[in-house]
Image: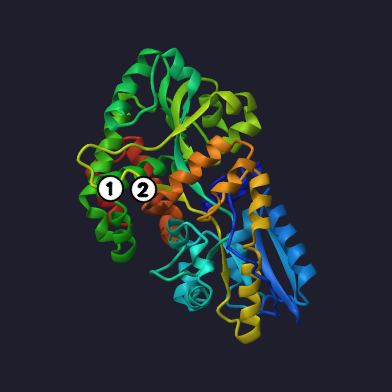
Amino acid sequence: MRIPRSRSSLRATGLAAAAALVVGGTLSGCGSSGPGGSGEGNISVWVYQDPSTKVQRQVVERFNKTSKIKVKLTQVPGDGYSDKLRTSMGTPNAPDVFFNWGGGSISEFVQKDMLLDLGPAMKKDPSLKQGFIPSILDAGGVEGKHYGIPMRGMQPVILFYNKDVFEKADARPPKSWNDILKLIGTFKSEGVTPFVVAGTDPWTELMWVEYLVDRFGGAGVFKKIQSEGKDAWGDPAVLKTARTIKDLVDRGAFGKNYKSVNYTADGASTYFAKGKAAMHLMGSWEYANQKTNQPAFAKSGLGWTTFPAVPGGTGDPKNVVGNPTNYWSISGKLKGKKQQAAIDFVKFAAKQDYAKALIANGDVPTTSDASSLLNGHENPTYAKFQYDMVRDAPDFTLSWDQALPAKYTPPLHTNVQKLFNGQLSPTAFVDAMKGM
């Protein structure tokens, strides 16, 4: 599952994030000690503990068999990961290499010069950069510089649909915004909620806002917000999005009870799988979620497509929003042999064996040349759809509540939820965003 800062524990439900690293050639590792309390001759590496952690344990075991310098892996429980990391950074107990979400999750560390700029390492070894889908690699950066190497994988937001519900209504998956509007009427007449949305978990509503802003104004709108601050929320695309959300709510696109529906307890997903809703805009982990909780539906009833363009929009309809991947970042305190040791471990963790292990875990690679591996996925059709969707995306926007500094997450969620609930008008929503 996606891991917003305040919802890290959701990942532990078994919705493993996708990930993979494949860099051409053999990238061997050697190492040294670091400031993470692991002692001389060791590299301290922190990882977020969830069902995917076994793959990181395996790569550490392989690395340690080939290197005199050993990696000491610390698996940090999800609920406390972000807080523990933030507390440790800048102290002697800080990790040498650590798992993160890129973007806003590490911006504070970048500002304090705590992280290693990986640009020189990528220039020295071009395969380290060329081995990944560009939009994925770039999405984890800060101010145009790379501070992270992809280490798990893609989690794009996908428009899922219930095949049985569509078949009963003699309907087809939407290819345009006009199709979306027509389908709202179609499914309402069938007594089915057109789109399930978990209104008690506003990050699920945020996905709608992110895609609509992108489709109306392009990926540059949010980039401008990131670089220029609160006044950039006044971009026309934001107001158009807010008005579109209001229109969808007024049309009954989300039904009448969405304010009380949850995602964390599988409420929205179960509602969708049981045919009470026709469509569900959700992260790619929804497949794993359904496979775990409604396996029959996941096997034959779950369909997927892309979010369509909007009338008059200037954004590229191939753009994607969501969680591009997770990243390894390296402490800026490391120098000389210690720094090289950390870089070498990251390179070692970029071998094809790592990718194969993650695909065997049901994940989808983030690498530029991984198509040939996807036949090994438990659902190759879904894996290839997801991979192609991300590979062909001109831009992959990181979820706003992770791309922005952590202090903005609560008001962002509150404003989005109030917009959906009718407590903020479109213009009031824009004003509230500008006031964050």
- The quadrant in which residue 227 appears is bottom left
Residue 430 is at least partly visible in this image: yes
Q: Are marks 2 and 1 in contact (CB under 8 Å)?
A: yes
Q: In the rendering, at what x and y percent does residue 288 appear?
A: 60, 37
Query: Which of the image's four quarters has the C terminus?
Result: bottom left
Give the left or right position of residue 123, taking residue 251 as reference. Answer: right
Q: Position of residue 316 (x, y in %)?
A: 30, 47
Which label number is shown at residue 319?
2
69, above or below 137, in the image: below
Count of labels in the image: 2
Q: CA distance from mark 2 to mark 1?
A: 8 Å
In which quarter of the view is residue 192 placed?
top left
Front-most of residues 143 and 200: 143
The residue indicated by pointer 1 is 315
Q: Quadrant of the N terminus?
A: top right
Vertical relation: 240 (above or below) 335: above
Q: What's the residue type where badge 2 is placed?
A: Asn
Checking the image for residue 153, the label placed there is: none
What is the x, y in percent for residue 400?
41, 53
Q: Circle 1: is it few (<14), some (14-19), or many (20+) Cα within 10 Å?
A: many
SS at circle 2: loop
Is residue 425 among the parts visible in the rendering? no
Q: Secondary structure at mark 1?
A: loop
Q: Position of residue 431 (x, y in %)?
A: 25, 51
Q: Amino acid at mark 1?
A: Gly
At horizontal 43% and vertical 71% (from top left) the residue drawn is 145
- Name the side, left or right, on which 253 lies relative to 430: right
Circle 2 packing at 10 Å, graded few (<14), some (14-19), many (20+), is: many
Which residue shows up at 64% across the image and 73% down it? Answer: 344
